[in-house]
């Protein structure tokens, strides 16, 4: 039997990204997922890779910033290796500014972004009239334009990683024994296992609903308006989402909550009126109690590791999550922020 250095359990965005990074560093890797790649929340539609606001800087925001900066070379290498596009493009984001107080705050954040984002991206306040027809209506006449946000198609991103891993000799298997270092990137099931073992909520699932429209907006920024993400994709579709539902009966059903999201999106972007809805999607995203990714030594499986809790920012966090987990399991180098350790949720 061929030697395996790393076993990754789970083929969502965290598991696939970690497997790719470990393989790129020369490790022999196997990925195990009984349901196949990208079948959980990583198989969604939206793909908004957007930063937190540039203020009250902390380890989580710094980690996310680093990861968003790492994303372009990360996905470029994945595509170059496997020949499948993840639909990645760093095109920025527009957000309407609803009132004078928010406008004042947006100007202040432009100053902090200039310092915290190290000149590698900008947070600007611009006049909506200068943007053109794609700009959502803004009561103040101004919008926030950040150049750090990027978009990708989640399913295509997972497919791109699977293809690149295959070129590296790594296949996603339905079942295989643990060999080498073991990393559990099992999403909601992993959080439920921890909650059951510790007799308290360590993490939970938050349902999200989204829709895909047949609408080719071209290479334009994504929008965030009325708490809705509106993300044009490279394939001529446009994703809208999402809800955040802590209580739900059916994790995969769509309902009037998604209808409301669609209504808000079309009010924010009148150009979308009449666009065909080609898919409605629902799934459950893994959210740790701390709301940060859960990385490090596994609390239950001695000598093994965990990478979980991506929630809404899993795709944006994936490049750096993969890097720090590869550092940990391959080199014994621990650079994980304290807030991300499992103990923060236990």
Image (cartoon, rainbow, N blue to C red):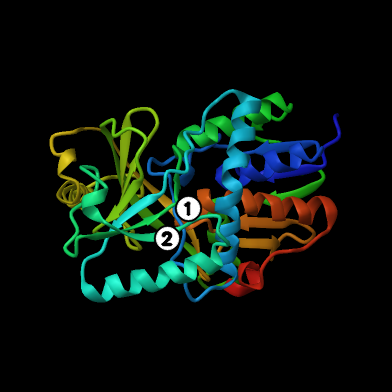
164 or 90, which is in the foreground? 90
Provide the residue designation for mark 1: 148
Residue positioned 55% across, 25% down in the render: 84
Q: Nearer the viewer's eye, disc 2 or disc 1?
A: 2
49 or 295, which is in the foreground? 49
Asked if residue 111 lies left or right of residue 71, the reply is left
Residue positioned 23% across, 54% down in the render: 128
Image quadrant in which the N terminus is located: top right
Residue positioned 53% across, 60% down in the render: 192
**Can you tell which quarter of the image residue 127 is in?**
bottom left
Upstream in the sequence, badge 2 or badge 1?
Answer: 2
Could you tell me residue 167's position as x and y percent?
Answer: 69, 24
Q: Residues within 10 Å of mark 1 (few under 14, many from 20)?
A: many
Q: Residues within 10 Å of mark 2 (few under 14, many from 20)?
A: many
219 w.r.t. 183: above or below: above
Instruction: Look at the image and tell me whether residue 193 can be seen.
Output: no
Asked if residue 63 lies left or right of residue 205, the reply is right
Could you tell me residue 87's position as x and y percent?
Answer: 47, 33
Could you tell me residue 110's position as x and y percent?
Answer: 42, 67
Instruction: Look at the image and tell me whether residue 270 can be seen.
Output: yes
230 or 195, which is in the foreground? 230
C-beta proximity under 8 Å, tags 2 and 1: yes
114 w.r.t. 221: above or below: below
Provide the residue designation for mark 2: 123
Measure the alpha-carbon separation of dots 2 and 1.
8 Å
Q: Which mark is residue 107?
A: none
């Amino acid at each position: 039997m061929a030697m395996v250095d790393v076993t990754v359990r789970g083929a969502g965005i965290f598991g696939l990204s970690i497997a790719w990074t470990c393989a790129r560093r020369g490790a022999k890797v196997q990925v195990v997922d009984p349901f196949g790649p990208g079948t959980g929340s990583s198989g969604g539609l939206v793909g908004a890779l957007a930063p937190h606001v540039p203020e009250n800087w902390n380890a989580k925001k710094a980690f996310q910033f680093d990861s968003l900066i790492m994303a372009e070379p990360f996905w470029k290498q994945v595509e170059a290796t496997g020949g499948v596009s993840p639909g990645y493009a760093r095109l920025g984001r527009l957000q309407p500014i609803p009132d004078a107080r928010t406008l004042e705050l947006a100007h202040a954040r432009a100053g902090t972004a200039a310092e915290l984002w190290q000149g590698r991206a900008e947070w600007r306040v611009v006049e909506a009239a200068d943007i053109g027809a794609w700009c959502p209506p803004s009561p103040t006449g101004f919008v926030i334009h950040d150049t750090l946000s990027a978009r990708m198609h989640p399913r295509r991103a997972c497919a791109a990683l699977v293809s690149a891993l295959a070129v590296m000799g790594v296949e996603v298997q339905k079942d295989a024994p643990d060999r080498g270092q073991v990393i559990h990137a099992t999403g909601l099931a992993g959080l439920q296992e921890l909650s059951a073992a510790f007799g308290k909520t360590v993490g939970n699932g938050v349902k999200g609903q989204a829709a895909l429209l047949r609408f080719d907006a071209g290479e334009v920024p994504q929008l965030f308006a009325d708490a809705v993400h509106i993300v044009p994709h490279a394939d001529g579709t446009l994703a809208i989402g999402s809800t955040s539902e802590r209580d739900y009966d059916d994790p995969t059903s769509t309902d009037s909550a998604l209808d409301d999201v669609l209504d808000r999106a079309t009010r924010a972007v009148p150009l979308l009126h009449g666009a065909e809805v080609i898919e409605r999607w629902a799934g459950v995203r893994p959210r740790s109690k701390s709301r940060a990714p859960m990385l490090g030594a596994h609390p239950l499986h001695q000598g093994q590791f965990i990478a979980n809790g991506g929630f809404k920012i899993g795709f944006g966090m994936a490049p750096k999550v993969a890097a720090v987990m590869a550092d940990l399991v391959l080199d014994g180098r621990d650079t994980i922020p304290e807030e991300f350790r499992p103990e923060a949720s236990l």
